[in-house]
Amino acid sequence: MCGTCGCGQGDKRVEDLHPHQAHEHADGAHSHEHDHAHEHSHTHADGITHSHLHNHEHGHNHGHSHDAAAAGATRLVSVERHILAKNDAIAAENRRDLQATKTLALNLVSSPGSGKTALLVETLKRIGDKYPVAVIEGDQETTADADRIRATGAPAIQINTGKGCHLDADLVRTGMSRLGTPANGILFIENVGNLVCPAGFDLGEAHKVVIVSVTEGEDKPLKYSGMFAASGLMVVTKTDLLPHLDIDIDRLIDNARRINPTIGVLKLSAKTGEGMDRWIHWLETARALRLATD
Amino acid sequence: MHEVSLATALINLVHEQAAAARARRVTRLVLEIGTLSHVDAHALRFAVDVVALGGPAEGATLEILEPEGTAYCLDCETSVAIAARGASCPRCGGVKLLVQGGDEMRLKEMEVV
C-alpha cells in the first residue's frame, strides 16, 4: 500500500509533517492502470524513500503455456507461510532500525476511550524533557490526538487508517521515516482503539501494552483474549473512579493472568497521578534494558 | 474489516507464489487457521472470495484446516488441548496455561494449473 499517495488503498493517510506540492516516483510516472502486482520505491522531495506494493489484479489469460501448465495438469505448491508474512517482514525491518538506534518502541493497544491519550500526555509531561520521545498516533480519522500530544512539546505524527481498524507495520514504517526515531529514547505507538485486530499485526515494537480502564468491567481479558495474550503489560487506568464503581479489580487481574500468566500489571490514574511513578519506573527500566542490550 | 486485511495479505501472497511457480491459475487454497487465532473462518472465506475477483485465484476452492488449541499447564506440567484462551486445564483445573498451538494463520499449500 502507499502511505503517501494512497494508491491502492484509498483512505489510509500518514500526516505530512513537511507539506509539499507533489511527490516524485523514482521509477518515473507510474500508471495505476496496468494489471499486475509490483513493488517499487519512490522518493519524496524531502529525500525520504519508501517502497510499497501495488496490488493490481491480473486478469488476462495468454494462449501460450509452459511446463506442466502445457498439459493443463494441476500441481500442488507447498507454501507454508504465515498469511501476514509481508507485514512481519516489514515489522522485522522496523525492529532492526529501532534496535540500531537503541529506541524503545511500545505499541499501546486498548478499546476506544480507555484513556490512552490522557495517559500519554501525562507521561510526556514527566519524561519529555529527560530523554528523546516521539509519538505515532493511529486513529481512523482526525489529527486531534496528535495535536494533544504536540501540545506537550513532544514530536508526534498522526496516521489515519480510514476504514482500517489497526495500524500495520508499513504505515508505522512510513510514520517512523517522517517523524524520525527518538534514538536512545522511547517511541510510543498509540494504536487504533480496538481490542481485536491490532493483536495480530506486529509493528516492530518491543512490547505491546494493553490499557484497560476500570469502567470496562472485569471480563475484558476473557472477551478479547488475543490482545491480552499478546501483551507484556496491562495498565489499568482511571483508578480515581473506583469509589463510584462495582468493579472487582482483583478479578480483572486474575482474568488477565488466566489468559497470560506472565503479563505484568500496573494500576494508575493519569488524572490524580496515583500510580504514575510506578509506570514511569517501568518505562525507564524498559528503556535501560534497551540501552544495555544490542 | 479485519478479515478483509487478512484476505488481501493472503491473496497478495498467493499471487506472489503463483508467479514464482509460473502458474496460470490457482484452483485450490489450503489454509491453517487455528481455533485460538483471532480470525473468523466464515468472514475470511467471504473476504477471500471478494478480494480474489479478477485475479488468478478467482473462484479457487478454499479449504480451511482448524487446528485445535494446545497449551502447557504450569500447574500439572502437561500439554493439554483447550477450546479457548482462558480455559481451565482439563486435567487439573489449573488456570495458568501457556498457549503452544492453535493460533496459526498460514497458507499451507495451493493447487495450481
Image: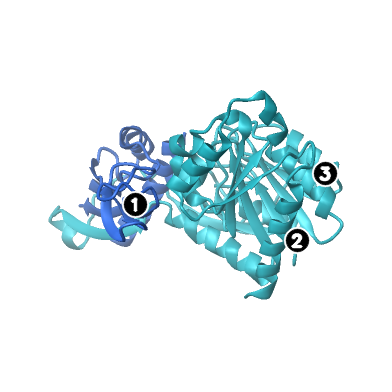
Chain colours: A cyan, B blue
Q: Secondary structure at mark 3?
A: helix
- Name the spot of residue A10 as percent of width and height, x first: 57, 36
Contact between labelled residues 3 and 1, with CB atoms less than 8 Å apart: no
Establish if A259 lies above or below A284.
above
- Residue linked to disc 2: A182
Nearest to the observer: residue B50 or residue B46: B46
| Horizontal arrangement in the rendering, residue A267 relative to residue A88 (left or right) | right
**Chain bearing mark 2:** A
| Horizontal arrangement in the rendering, residue A71 relative to residue A233 (left or right) | left
Disc 1 and disc 3 on one polypeptide chain: no
- Name the spot of residue B68 as percent of width and height, x first: 26, 47
Q: Quadrant of residue A203?
A: bottom right
The kind of residue on which mark 3 rests is Arg
Q: Quadrant of residue A57?
A: top left
Mark 1 closeness class: few <14, some 14–19, many ≥20 residues within 10 Å: many
Mark 2 closeness class: few <14, some 14–19, many ≥20 residues within 10 Å: many
The structure residue drawn at horizontal position 68% and vertical position 40%, both measured from the top left corner, is A116
Q: Secondary structure at mark 2?
A: loop
- Residue linked to disc 1: B104
Contact between labelled residues 2 and 3, with CB atoms less than 8 Å apart: no
Nearest to the observer: residue A133 or residue A257: A257
| Horizontal arrangement in the rendering, residue A230 relative to residue B65 (left or right) | right
The kind of residue on which mark 1 rests is Glu
Establish if B18 lies above or below A150.
below
Cα–Cα gap, marks 1 and 3: 39 Å
